[in-house]
Structure formats: structure tokens, C-alpha cells
């Protein structure tokens, strides 16, 4: 018997683990242009397959969103690598009031349920993972966004050494707006594009920054083609994808920064000291200066 392909998905699913229709609707906030699962009418989807996020609160929130959106007796399949949250999925779905069938394949745990789940438990998970005001930051954020409730050490080091900027620029991987707020503190900044691949980050940045100089962009900074001739780029580039280290991500950010900067423009970059970015910077920029090094992080200024 051939298993029916899913028409609704959340995340990148391996076809050998879950059959997915070629025209399936995507709901992951990490896919620019995807639909927002939280905005879907309750009990309206006829099934969904989800690659579960690795963070506990984020994962429970996503599963609760799915259960709320599914029609009665519609199938929900949730899977993840065992060491990326997969070993917890069955228990967490049970805590949401679901009866679960669990199997293992290719180092993944695969859980299937038809809901509908416990209304109170689902509502609690939705509240816990929803956007919230973080008093310590004085900013809006949401679990699942990078460093969602604190300023990460790399960004803190860059903030401590970032000069007053001027002209038009961009914040690659802007998150909730930590670096952008500092850049916009200079009245000489005329325009700032804030780009992030995470829809939730862009939405939080919109809440946190009300400035006519800003353009918010839900996009992969490496692929956006609307920028050119910039005076500066600031960034704390990601180096994890799907919970695993991927150094190519940061290298791609650096390559894109070099492409969009004018001659003489500057890239301000913070990164973990073990990441091999120096060679890429020196190959693409006229000068590269190590500005600071502390606590396992480095800050570079690269001039094109």
C-alpha cells in the first residue's frame, strides 16, 4: 500500500523518510515566502509533516500550532534526528494530549498522531513559544530566534567596538535588531536594510525598530539581489544549520557583503575565533584588520 504524500510540510524533509507532494505548501519560518502556520484557520489542514525544531520551547510551540491547524483525525507526522530533539518528540506529543505511534529510521525518530490533543496543553505551549517582551533586553523576541533572550557574546564584542557609521548599509542576519539599533544610533546613517532568513526575527525587529531609514527583508542574505553600492555591512553570520555546524554559511555572508559594498565600503564582522574566515576576507577585501579578540570571539573590519 502506497503512503499518501503530504501536501503541507514544515521544514526540509527527507523524501525517503516522509513522502511529500511536489507542490506541498511550506510553513517553516526559515523558508522565505512560506506560509505562517500560526495564521492558518483552526481545524483547516488535512495533514502535515514536520521536521521538528531542535529547541524544546520552539518545538512544542510548532507542534501545538500544527495540532491547532489540523482538521479532526488529520495525520501529523513529526520527526527529527535522535540527538536533535527526536528522542523527546513522543513524550512531548503525549504531554499535548496525543496518542503517538513511534518508529525509528536513518537515525531519526518518527512520530505519528491524529490529534486532536488536549486544548489546555496546546494553548499553554502556544503561549510559552509566542512573541514576548524580554525585560533584560528591552526588546521583543521569540523562542527559536537566534539568541532570543540575551545578547550573544559575539554581538556584544562587536557592539563594544563598532564606530559611528554613515551612509547606506545592511545588517545581514539582523535577528531582533541588536546590531541595527547601534548602527542607527548614528544620524549619518541614511538607509539600513535589515535581512534575516527567519520570519520571526524580522517580525520582532519590526516591533523593536521604528525608523523610516529601515527596510525589513525576510530573505537569505546570501541570495538577496536588491542591494548594491553600500557604504557598510554589519553582521554576526550564522554557522549552524539544522543544529549542525556549517562554516560555509558565514563564508557566503562574507562573499555577499563584498559583492554589495562599494569600493572603500566596510564590513564589520564578529565570529567565533575558530571559524576560518580570514582567508575569505583577505581574498575579497583590500584590507582586513583584527579589531578585537576576547572570550573566544573576534571582530574584523574589512575594507573593500
Image (cartoon, rainbow, N blue to C red):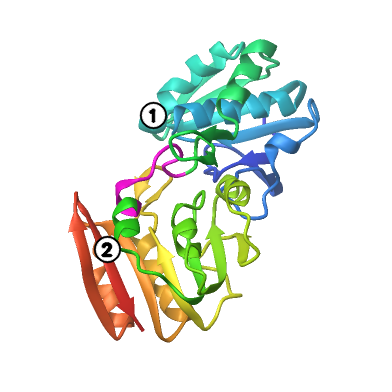
Q: Nearer the viewer, residue 233 or 16?
A: 233
Which stretch is magenta?
146-155
Q: Residue at x 80, y 32 (%)?
A: 41
**Residue matched to label 1:** 82
Q: Is residue 215 visible?
A: yes
Q: Is residue 247 left or right of residue 75?
A: left
Q: In the image, residue 8 lies at what x, y percent?
A: 69, 39
Q: Nearer the viewer, residue 19 or 207?
A: 207
- Count the labels in the image: 2
Q: Main secondary structure of the magenta part?
A: loop
Element at label 1: helix
Mark 1 Cα shell of 10 Å, populated few (<14), some (14-19), many (≥20): some
**Residue matched to label 2:** 299
The quarter of the picture where the N terminus appears is top right
Q: Nearer the viewer, residue 125 or 93?
A: 125
Q: Is residue 42 left or right of residue 102?
A: right
Element at label 2: strand
Amino acid at each position: 500500500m502506497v503512503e499518501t504524500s503530504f501536501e503541507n510540510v514544515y521544514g526540509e524533509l527527507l523524501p525517503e523518510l516522509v513522502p511529500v507532494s511536489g507542490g506541498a505548501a511550506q510553513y517553516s519560518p526559515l523558508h522565505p515566502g512560506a506560509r505562517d502556520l500560526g495564521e492558518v484557520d483552526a481545524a483547516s489542514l488535512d495533514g502535515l509533516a514536520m521536521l521538528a525544531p531542535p529547541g524544546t520551547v520552539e518545538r512544542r510551540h510548532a507542534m501545538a500550532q500544527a495540532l491547532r491547524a489540523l482538521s479532526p483525525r488529520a495525520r501529523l507526522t513529526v520527526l527529527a534526528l535522535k540527538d536533535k530533539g527526536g528522542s523527546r518528540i513522543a513524550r512531548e506529543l503525549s504531554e499535548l494530549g496525543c496518542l503517538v505511534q513511534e518508529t525509528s529510521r536513518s537515525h531519526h525518530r518518527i512520530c505519528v498522531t491524529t490529534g486532536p490533543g488536549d486544548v489546555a496543553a496546546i494553548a499553554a505551549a502556544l503561549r510559552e513559544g509566542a512573541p514576548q517582551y524580554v525585560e533584560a533586553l528591552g526588546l521583543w523576541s521569540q523562542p527559536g530566534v537566534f539568541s532570543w533572550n540575551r545578547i550573544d557574546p559575539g554581538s556584544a564584542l562587536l557592539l563594544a567596538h563598532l564606530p559611528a557609521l554613515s551612509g547606506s548599509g545592511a545588517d545581514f542576519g539582523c535577528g531582533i535588531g541588536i546590531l541595527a539599533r547601534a548602527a542607527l544610533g548614528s544620524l549619518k546613517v541614511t538607509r539600513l536594510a535589515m535581512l534575516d532568513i527567519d520570519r520571526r526575527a524580522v517580525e520582532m525587529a519590526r516591533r523593536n525598530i521604528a525608523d523610516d531609514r529601515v527596510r525589513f527583508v525576510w530573505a537569505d542574505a546570501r541570495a538577496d539581489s536588491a542591494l548594491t553600492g553600500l557604504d557598510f555591512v554589519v553582521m554576526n553570520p550564522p554557522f549552524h544549520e539544522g543544529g549542525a555546524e556549517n562554516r560555509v554559511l558565514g563564508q557566503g555572508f562574507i562573499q555577499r557583503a563584498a559583492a554589495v559594498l562599494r569600493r572603500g565600503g566596510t564590513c564589520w564582522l564578529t565570529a567565533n575565533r575558530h571559524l576560518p574566515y580570514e582567508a575569505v576576507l583577505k581574498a575579497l577585501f583590500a584590507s582586513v584588520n583584527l579589531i578585537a579578540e576576547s572570550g573566544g570571539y573576534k571582530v574584523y573590519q574589512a575594507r573593500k
